Image (spheres, rainbow, N blue to C red):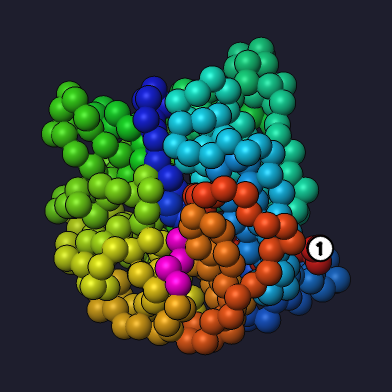
Amino acid sequence: MGSATSSDSSGGSATTAGTAGTATTTAATTATDGSGSDDGSSTGTPVELTPMFVAMGDGGWTASSCDRGRTWTTHAFSDEQGDHTQWTGFGGLAYGPGGFVAGFGWGAEGGHILHATDGLSWEDLPSESFVDDGVAIGSGIYTSGVAALPSSFMIFSQRVWHSTNGVDWVTTDVSLPPGAEQLRQLRGFPESALLVAAVESQSGNQHPTGNFVVVSEDEGATWSEGTGFDGNCASPIQHSGDIEMIGDTLLVATGDVCRSPDRGLTWEVYTQPTGGSIQDLGHDDDGFIAAAGTQLMTSSDGVTWTTKGEIGTQLRAVAFVDGVYAGITSPGAAPWYSDDGVTWQAGELDAAVVGDLWIRDFAAVMIEGTCG
């Protein structure tokens, strides 16, 4: 991804999910007992919750599943594919108040922000949705990062935008710290109130060249860089790898894994603990999960990894919600699902994929009501 002033990009995932990445985004409405519903104590009426998976790729392509990964509804806005088009999906995908937001555009005139309340019916937001000092100006020519916050969203593009509903956006004075010339991946963790940015210094101005990670506890007003981070953990993260968080433990991984036990204050480095590249990170009920080669791997601590399932094909993204795992390949966008993470089956798209479609992000959430 790129910073608000950069000229190159990332690929990212959604935890508030994630693919390059992807991470698993869990909505604030997820039932605390894991049953998929709550007791309705605030209203007296039980709230029905439905697990949902959403993938996004270049061309404004989305695929959504409301039946635990078995079947998928797809939609595409364009047949443009590749890293430098107005429909490159480097901005990623996030779920928060008002639904889903997905960001597109890199290195070409134009750029698009999509919104879907239900994850199925997507709108390409018009210029009037983006207001700077009372004037509608559009979102900018690219989108380098989309993240969910505890009660809002942020978009990093040529400007930084804020929204409380995913539809109406205003500019903010937020900026990345000095030396962060390229934003490579952005992740928001609403339950932890933490914003994490994998960034890069290319010129060496105000920061040594290479990849590093900064975190913000106040929605981007201030940023801090911990000690001990190794740039190899994030160097290809604009195309593969991810950022994930459980409790105060933060992982950044593309093959090498950097682990922070204290919300990004200090980092430990582990060289390829899964035995190779990591395409995506997420978490299930027991700990971290990773799509690594053709395997789903798990770890309780982010340090020691074991193989849980052999998928038989390399997944680009993986996620878990309400007892079910789902993943998707890239290029080509073939979905897979598993009820235990061990045995996997192929899902079904409602329309054939055209071209070498690249998946950029993946989300797994519990939505209110039913869908589909």
Q: Is residue 185 magenta?
A: no
Q: Nearer the viewer, residue 148 or 100?
A: 100
The residue depicted at 81 percent of the width and 63 percent of the height is 372
Give the main secondary structure, helix, strand or loop, of the magenta stretch.
loop
Asked if residue 360 lies left or right of residue 180, the reply is right
What residue span does the magenta drawing correspond to?
A: 313-317
Task: Name the quarter where the N terminus is drawn.
Answer: top left
Horizontal and vertical percent for residue 50?
73, 70
* Relative height, residue 222 to residue 63 (above, below): above
Name, please, the residue furthest toward the front: 355
Marker count (numbered): 1
The residue depicted at 54 percent of the width and 82 percent of the height is 344
Say which residue label 1 marks: 372
The image quadrant that residue 161 belongs to is: top right
Horizontal and vertical percent for residue 266?
20, 56
Q: Nearer the viewer, residue 308 or 267?
A: 308
* Relative height, residue 68 to residue 14 (above, below): below
Asked if residue 206 lies left or right of residue 348, the reply is left
The residue depicted at 34 percent of the width and 49 percent of the height is 237
Q: Is residue 314 magenta?
A: yes
Residue type indicated by callout 1: Gly
Q: Let me know if residue 97 appears in the view.
A: no
Is disc 1 placed on a helix, strand or loop? loop
Q: Residues within 10 Å of mark 1 (few under 14, many from 20)?
A: few
Horizontal and vertical percent for residue 64?
68, 59
* Relative height, residue 68 to residue 128 (above, below): below
The image quadrant that residue 203 belongs to is: top left
Horizontal and vertical percent for residue 260?
26, 61
Q: Let me know if residue 122 appears in the view.
A: yes
Q: Nearer the viewer, residue 176 or 104?
A: 104
Q: Nearer the viewer, residue 333 or 273?
A: 333
The residue depicted at 46 percent of the width and 31 percent of the height is 84
